[in-house]
Image (cartoon, rainbow, N blue to C red):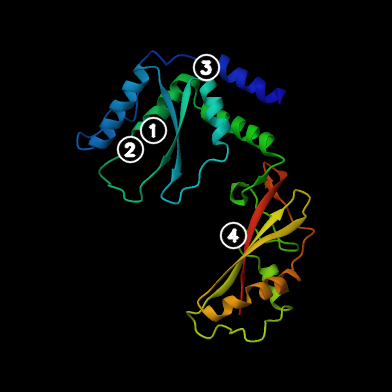
Amino acid sequence: MKKIILILICLTLFSCDFVKKESKSRFDNISEKDTTCLNGIKEAKIDIQKGKLVYCYVMGGLLYHGLRSEKELTLVLKQNNIEFRGIAVSDVVDPNQTQCYCPFMEEKISEKYGKKFIDSILDVSDKLYLKNSINDTLYYADCDKRPNYPNDNSEYQDDYSDVLQKEVETKMIYPKGYIKRRKNDDYAFVDIRFYVSKKGESKALNFNFLTNIETNYKFKKELEKEIKKYLKTENWKPAQIRGENVNSDMNFRFQLK
């Protein structure tokens, strides 16, 4: 914690005013046709004149995923008189129009604080996030490494475990009357949500069944009980953040016959 505080102090003490001498900018010669960019620059300049600097974090499109350390980053930026703004971009892009507010702000922040300032702030914030969340149950997609099922060495960051699939499907017995998939467009699977501790211990929290064979839904409880019998609850590889084991949830999809 002392190290983090020292970093924050250093970032504040060594910040400097905007470079007074004129420097070349990639925004000096924007086409008059790119009105979106020109308006963005105009808005940014007005904000800067008011003493307002903004750091933008692009989160993606409609199904965006936010920054895990957003809360911590917002506080650290505020200590340096910078506002945080999360940006969800549209999937529809006009190649002749450019969003320039955020890039222009980023350029001005670099001029004032140095080119490595934002990277340093992001690193400090992420360390604070880990410190603040070390005993929480974290969303698996927020982790650097997701939990892995025992004996599964796959590096793919997806919701499927080949080991879990093979171990369970070779042992489980389907209820009498269960209708197995017959056509290529038939589907039947269960999403299993786990809690996985930093010690590698797990617990199945819930089962979500999905199939287009409606009559099979009546077997949900029997299937859940049967699958649970063969799920391993120890020796998981825990999720990790910055090389440190953390508690997390995890979702694995098991394909039914």
- The earlier-in-sequence mark between 2 and 4 is 2
Residue 120, disc: none
Q: What residue type is labelled 1?
A: Cys
How far apart are the two marked residues, 2 and 1, measured between alpha carbons? 7 Å
Q: Which amino acid does label 2 sit on?
A: Gln
Callout 4: SS? loop
Residue located beneath label 2 in the image: 99
Q: What residue type is labelled 4?
A: Asp
Callout 4: few (<14), some (14-19), or many (20+) C-alpha neighbours within 10 Å? few
Residue at left 59%, top 31%? 125
Foreground mark, 3 or 4?
Answer: 4
What is the crowding at mark 3: few (fewer than 14 residues within 10 Å), some, or many (at least 20)?
A: some
Direction from residue 105 to residue 76 in the image, left or right: right
Residue 42: name its quadrant. Answer: top left
The residue beneath circle 1 is 102
In the rendered structure, which disc, 3 or 2, sits on the residue that comes first in sequence? Answer: 3
Q: Position of residue 80 (x, y in %)?
A: 52, 20
